[in-house]
Image: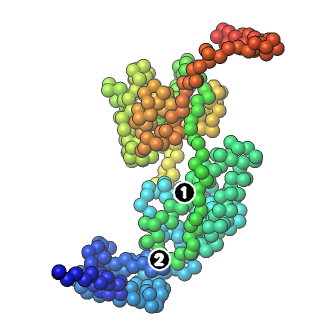
Amino acid sequence: MSEAVPAKKAVGKADSRYWQQTGKLMTDARWGGAYYCKIQVNGRRESFPLRTANKSAAATKAARIYGDVVALGWDAALAKHKPDEKRTKGALTGDLIREASTLADVRPATLAANVSAFRRIVASVAKIDATKGRFARCGNGRSAWLAAVDAVPLEKVTPSAVEAWKLAFVASRSANDENKARSARNTANATLRSAKSLFSKRLLRFIAPKIELPSPLPFDGVEFFARQSMRFVSTIDVKKIIAEAGTQLANSDSEAFKAFILCLFAGLRRNEADKLRWASVDLDAGFIRIEAHEHFAPKAETSLADIPLDAEVIPILRGMKARAPKAEYVLDGVNPKTSLTWRPYRADETFARLGAWLKAQGVNSRTPLHTLRKEAGSLICQASGLFAASRFLRHADVAITAQHYAAQKDRVTIGLGSMLTPPTSNVIAADFKGAESTAIAKRKAVSA
């Protein structure tokens, strides 16, 4: 019999042979293409530049660094092997925001929203008065509020404090009203999700070497509320509103009528309608093209698409364009000063008038213009299915359409009512006949 081949003995991380194995050492342009290693001890992970392109020498250094982390501890090992990366002790909220803002790979407007959400939570945890001045884009009131929030030590923003904020936020807005409570839970989830993004794994691996982060981190173990249903249910007679818009609104406010056409028949978001240029409207081919330009960034890449128009809408838009042949934008408006993080609406006054008109027609939602987009998506879903609605609304995922816009508008019943025998008891029969007569009378009145 042949002798058994002895199994290879595993080597530990303090042995340079471990680091010479495939995948243990990596190269990165940040360190001039030289090798670097990642070391994890006691749940903490750090990257160390090895400053050599020689794999054998790099493996020896990596083994030595690992041994120092185990023997000396993280702080001493970092000071010894990464002396050029000094860490800020007792980091403040402002330190985290500064580092995350430098490293975040998101659009400026998204970053601004994430930072605002985190400051909102920190201010509540630290009991910093939320004065109206904090909403100003400049001035002493905002400067003072920002300075106070950014000076809060991160170690005070504990998971238990964030959890308490979450519960208090909903309680303060529900007032024993379940509908308000559901809305507040959605808002709390959105705020938490935005703020937590500043502590993503991608960011933390770059931030941790620079500032001393608390343990646990502010959002460790903090769970979101269970997803609340956001299914859209139509409560308006859209056909009646279209008829009223074609007569009343078209004659009294042509700009508001134009915005109505864009939001309902093309399903545009407010910002898309606001920044839409005539150059992006192809009336011969019958579609609107949503495309980025210097004053407009789409909500997502999937938002960039061609939107087909009803044949009846095309001559209406053609007539509107003929009235102002030199206009650059479809909607009239002013071009206010903008920044990367703040882009106000050009046609804000038009949107306000259209919103007021829609409310007068019975559109009682908090966002009446967006309700037009929801109606468009719901009608297409009813007529052509979920995927057609998702394409029309330009969602990133069909699941979003199913969650928000796939409300069933057809009346669907069990279909067995014809088999039900009316009650035979004299008293019940009399009540049945009386109720039926009343219902018939109401239907006749509505028809009249």
Residue at position x 27%, y 78% in the image = 21
Residue 159: image location, x then y, percent: 62, 67
Locate the C terminus and report the quarter of the image it occupies: top right
Query: In the depicted view, which residue is nearer to us: 203 or 280?
Result: 203
Residue at position x 49%, y 58% in the image = 111
Question: SS class of the residue under badge 1?
Answer: helix
Residue 13: image location, x then y, percent: 35, 83
Asked if the residue at tag 1 contacts the one at tag 2, i.e. Cβ–Cβ closer than 8 Å, the answer is: no
Q: Quadrant of residue 276?
A: top left
Q: In this rendering, is residue 172 above or below 244?
A: below
Question: What label sits on residue 193 in the rendered view?
Answer: 1
Residue 341: image location, x then y, percent: 49, 54
Residue 377: image location, x then y, percent: 48, 32
Q: Is residue 11 left or right of residue 107?
A: left
Query: In the depicted view, which residue is nearer to us: 395 or 265?
Result: 395
Q: Is residue 347 left or right of residue 430?
A: left
Question: What label sits on residue 207 in the rendered view?
Answer: none
Neighbour tally class for label 1: few under 14, some 14-19, many 20 plus, Cα within 10 Å: some
Q: Is residue 404 left or right of residue 126?
A: left
Neighbour tally class for label 2: few under 14, some 14-19, many 20 plus, Cα within 10 Å: few
- The amino acid pointed to by label 1 is Arg
Q: Which of marks 2 and 1 is nearer the N terminus?
A: 2
Residue at position x 64%, y 10% in the image = 447
CA–CA distance in space, label 2 to label 1:
23 Å
Question: What label sits on residue 44 in the rendered view?
Answer: 2
Q: Can residue 278 be seen in this view?
A: no
Q: Nearer the viewer, mark 2 or mark 1?
A: 2
Locate the N terminus and report the quarter of the image it occupies: bottom left
Q: In this rendering, is residue 392 above or below 112?
A: above
Query: In the depicted view, which residue is nearer to us: 178 or 146?
Result: 178
Q: In which quarter of the image is residue 196?
A: bottom right
Residue at position x 57%, y 72% in the image = 216
